[in-house]
Image (cartoon, coloured by chain):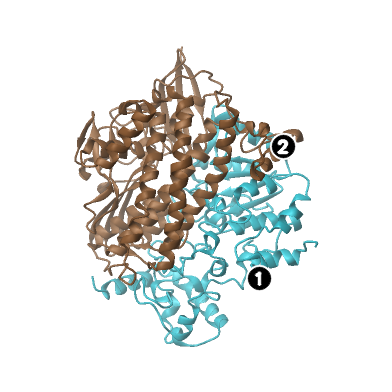
Amino acid sequence: MAKKITVSPLTRIEGHLKIDVEIEGGKIVDARSAGEMFRGWEVILKGRHPLDAQQITQRICGVCPTAHGHASTRALDDAFEITPPDNGRLLRNMVLGANFIQSHILHFYHLAALDYVDISAILKYKGNSPKLNKVKRWAKAELDSGRSNALSPFLPRYKGDYIEDDELNIEAISHYLEALEMRKKAHEALTLFGGKMPHTMSVIPGGITEKPTVDKIAAYLSYMKELHSFIEKKYLPDVIAVAQNYPHYFGIGKGSGNFLAYGTFEENSEGTELFLTRGVVIDGTYRQFDKMKINEYVGFSKYKSESGLHPWSGKTDPDPEKEKSYSFIKAPRYDDTVMEVGPLARMVVAYLSGKNEAVKNLVDGTCASIGIQVSDLFSVLGRHAARALECLMVAERCQQWPMELKPGEPVHTPFTIPSEAKGSGLAEAPRGAVSHWIKIHEHLIDLYQVVAPTTWNCSPRDDQGQRGAVEQALVGTPVADVANPIEPVRVVRSFDP
Amino acid sequence: MKLTRRKFLQICAGSAAAYGTSSVLTPQVVHALKQKAGNQPVIWLHGQGCTGCAVSLLNAQRPDIAETLLDIISLDYHEAVMASAGEVSMGVLDSALADRAGDYILVVEGGIPTAHNGDYCYIGEKDDKPVTMLEAVHTMGERAKAVVAVGSCACWGGIPSAPPNPTGAKPVSEVLPNATLINIPGCPPHPDWMVGTIAHLLLFGIPHLDRLKRPTMFFGPNKIVHDNCERRQYFDKGQFAKDFSDEGCLYELGCKGPITHCDISTRGWLGGVNWCVRSGGGCIGCTEPSFPGNTGDGLYEKLPAAQVPGLPSINAKANTIGIALGAATAAGIAGHALGRAITKGRGKGKEG
């Protein structure tokens, strides 16, 4: 008989997520992923001024507001029929790029690593780092105090197979602290041109409001050099160290095996050339992306509106009591196929597109050095590795874009807000493909739909009964101790929901 | 040297030059805090938010977030940070109620949906039943030493409560009308506003609050964005930016600085590397109860007071203009038709 377990809240993610799994013979045989919150962006945006969209939709996610801002301004650019000048395009990329780095570092060290690293190892620290000794003194005082929830927020936690090597744990704790500084530096670099973070002020349709001056360019480059060095010397080696301690996680959490990437970071003003490749991989074959093949199903979602609509005719009419429904997340599908999005999807799409030698060499080289096949990347560890590799690539490119800026040249193209128009904006958030869809009527927003990355990954079943990407990745996952289901939470967190 | 409340307020206001403009917790303050017995337990609940307030807290400069966690607070419950998950997490709330009732501070981030019995946001599950944010705020709030609402969603309702407020989103003040409450608005709030308020709470008790329960040391009547704006000289000279990225005062592009309370124009984001108006984006009034305005309004629409003939060119005293604009704005926000007329007028007036 199957044993049912629930993890709610599923923590160290952005948002409210629950997973229900059924376990039989020590393995998950069925899974449900449920989004537990509804705010109603689409409903609130209707009737508002089109320029508000990029400010308001940034507030969907405080970890990746720049990605929503980017998708939204792309949708408005499209609707207004404008393209940003080179300076505007490059500065937008630099803002988005800095947040990719921030988000990837935050995800690995502060959201995911606590599933592997044993923080209590700090008590055995014998070195002379003032910072680590301070943590050690704190940990000892906390444990000696005997208070409930001592050593919070690091304890309590699930019991499980944490890393046993003290030296490795202590090094990871040291990097956890350093990564807090690094992710903040990425935000500082971003704010030079973004004005504020979270939630940037300067990104607008037609470009950006901030100007590229030599002092700011120099500061940005200095930040990026430091971040690049951290990624190369600490982040990537730490991911490999986790992989060496948990090699079986290359075989856990495979998922749908189909991948979608809109691509992002425009390399020309029309946006036809992208630094991160656009495309679709279904059954191991690369295909061109067609934006009209996206549909959102709500058969198992808490919406009473019609199911299977394209976002340009999308509806968002919530009903918390709807029969058979179990999630506020809709179920977007591409060509009726369940797709995974995120850094792994972007790597796979670029790898199989045949157009991106840099990614192919990076992936082949990394797989060879770890001693795995490319197909082993379809896994928990593969997602972490893809994220780290992408972080390195973006940090490299972020040192090149500033050199293409032309101080004194325009940063923004003037625009007229049309009376009637429609537009779409495709971008990548650190956690995956994000698209915004707008229709304007009498100068105001008539329809706005957002298909966020986590709706692809964490979606419930669609009307055909197909499980969402995370649900599929959970099925087959071994669970050693049903009271401490650490394996399934590792699977879910590898998606960075 | 003993840390006095007066000295502390000077530090918070950034007026003590030696402390720089973006550091609340100087070694002196940290030392004073360490004299208190043990770290302050904090329970941080997320409702209808975006986690942006929590991310902003991670951007604290001096002390940084690690020092804050080690020296000042015990962050017992925080969905985005804590190691635990599921039942183990929910157990933390139980033990806080059992062992630390009346002792912990409850921090609320995000709005609280009240429609449909709170079913628009579950924070976890207990005894096989979902726990709504509404229920959790009641349970944890009623036994807290103090409640701190961080961010404009928790303070005023914010974006989830914008018309037509599809989920009945409410601020903490309406869910817990009798709580000892401090509002720290902003979308997100500056980390100094959060850390500074907690520090004041621990060292000297509740800071001085205005009628909206905002600490006046950060949001007082002398902290109007426009009054301390580095582009203020342009306004006084009547030099207005006509399009984004132009030099000049951003008033014509919809800057809400004249009605917005906070010290961001002197404090700056991320250690002061930039801030909203300096970057050319203007102020969208994110700390104000009116944020993000009504359907038909626009975050980039000119404050309606600009309709008063000649007002922008009057080289009047700051206070006179601030008050005049504030009053006119309150009337303007109710006037959707006026807002739309401005939108269309501006759109048509521009070259494509």
Q: Quadrant of residue A278?
A: top left
Q: Quadrant of residue A443?
A: bottom left
Q: Are marks 1 and 2 in contact (CB under 8 Å)?
A: no
Q: Colour of chain B?
A: cyan
Q: Colour of chain A?
A: brown
Please tell me whether mark 1 sits on a helix, a strand or a loop. Answer: loop
Q: Position of residue B252 (x, y in %)?
A: 39, 76
Q: Residue at x 23, y 28 (%)?
A: A283
Depth check, front residue: A403 or B134: A403
Q: Relative to residue B255, is residue B168 depicted above or below?
A: above
Disc 2 marks a residue whose amino acid type is Glu
Q: Is residue A143 left or right of residue A392?
A: right
Tally the marks. Answer: 2
Q: Residue at x 64, y 38 (%)?
A: A152
Q: Which mark is residue B304?
A: none
Can residue A308 be seen here? The reply is no
Residue furthest right as drawn:
B2
Q: Position of residue A253 (x, y in %)?
A: 39, 26
Depth check, front residue: A196 or A109: A109
Q: Is residue B285 left or right of residue A204?
A: right
Find disc 2 in the rendering and name its residue. Answer: A142
Are discs 1 and 2 both within one chain? no
**CA neighbours of label 2 inside 10 A, class few (<14), some (14 to 19), many (20+):** many
Mark-to-mark CA distance, 1 and 2: 36 Å
Q: Position of residue A431 (x, y in %)?
A: 39, 42
Depth check, front residue: B329 or A489: A489
Q: Position of residue B268 (x, y in %)?
A: 53, 65
Find disc 1 in the rendering and name its residue. Answer: B15
Q: Relative to residue B162, is residue B352 depicted above or below?
A: below
